[in-house]
Amino acid sequence: MQLKDEVRRLRNTARWSWQGWRSTWAREKSLRQWAMLNAASAVLAFSLHLTPGERALIIALGLMILVMELVNTAIEETVDYISDAQDPRAGRAKDAGSAAVAVTAIAGGLAWAVILIG
């Protein structure tokens, strides 16, 4: 491919990603809550005497929570688009997405606990 095509593809990918972020931000209170908590966590990570590795871990896990919230929203939107009928499989899919967010949040919390206690 030509460089021009790659630049256009990259620009489109960035635009679609930004659209996904903005749409989810506007509709999902949980994403906004996690983002605010992560901002506070990052400020705290840079306020405390932590190693660069500890800071990187805290910030990376915080970003992973946001990633999982975006994935969870994608699962919920897809399930709701496919059918509005009650189906146990749809419920399990949504619950699994929610659990992924929770497990990632627990990982972030545990990282903070180990860093602060250790």
Image: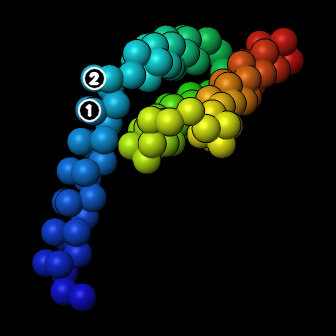
Instruction: Name the quadrant containing residue 80.
Output: top left
Which residue does the image show at 26% across and 42% down from the upper left?
18
Find out whether the residues at labels 1 and 2 contact each other: C-beta distance under 8 Å: yes
Instruction: Name the quadrant containing residue 51.
Output: top right
Residue topped by disc 2: 26
Image coordinates of residue 99 in percent, x first then y, are 69, 30
The quadrant of the rendering that contains the N terminus is bottom left
The quadrant of the rendering that contains the C terminus is top right
Q: Nearer the viewer, residue 75 or 92?
A: 92
Is residue 48 depicted above or below 59 in this figure? above
Which residue does the image show at 61% across and 12% down from the upper left?
48
**Of the numbered discs in the image, which one, if any, rests on residue 55?**
none
Q: How far is disc 1 from disc 2 in space, using C-alphas?
A: 6 Å
Image coordinates of residue 66 in percent, x first then y, are 50, 31
Image coordinates of residue 84 in percent, x first then y, are 44, 35
Farthest right residue? 118
Q: Nearer the viewer, residue 94 or 11?
A: 94
Give the class, few, some or many, for how many residues have Cα within 10 Å of label 1's Cα (few <14, many ≥20). few
> Horizontal placement of 10 versus 29: left or right?
left
Give the class, few, some or many, for how many residues have Cα within 10 Å of label 2's Cα (few <14, many ≥20). few
> Horizontal placement of 18 versus 101: left or right?
left
Which residue does the image show at 19% across and 86% down from the upper left?
2
Q: Amino acid at mark 1?
A: Arg
Residue topped by disc 1: 22
Q: How is the image coloured?
A: rainbow
Which residue does the image show at 50% across and 13% down from the upper left?
37
Is residue 16 depicted above or below 36 in this figure? below
Q: Amino acid at mark 2?
A: Ala
Confirm whether residue 61 shows in the render.
Answer: no
Q: Secondary structure at mark 2?
A: helix
Q: Nearer the viewer, residue 4 or 95?
A: 95
Confirm whether residue 98 shows in the render.
Answer: yes
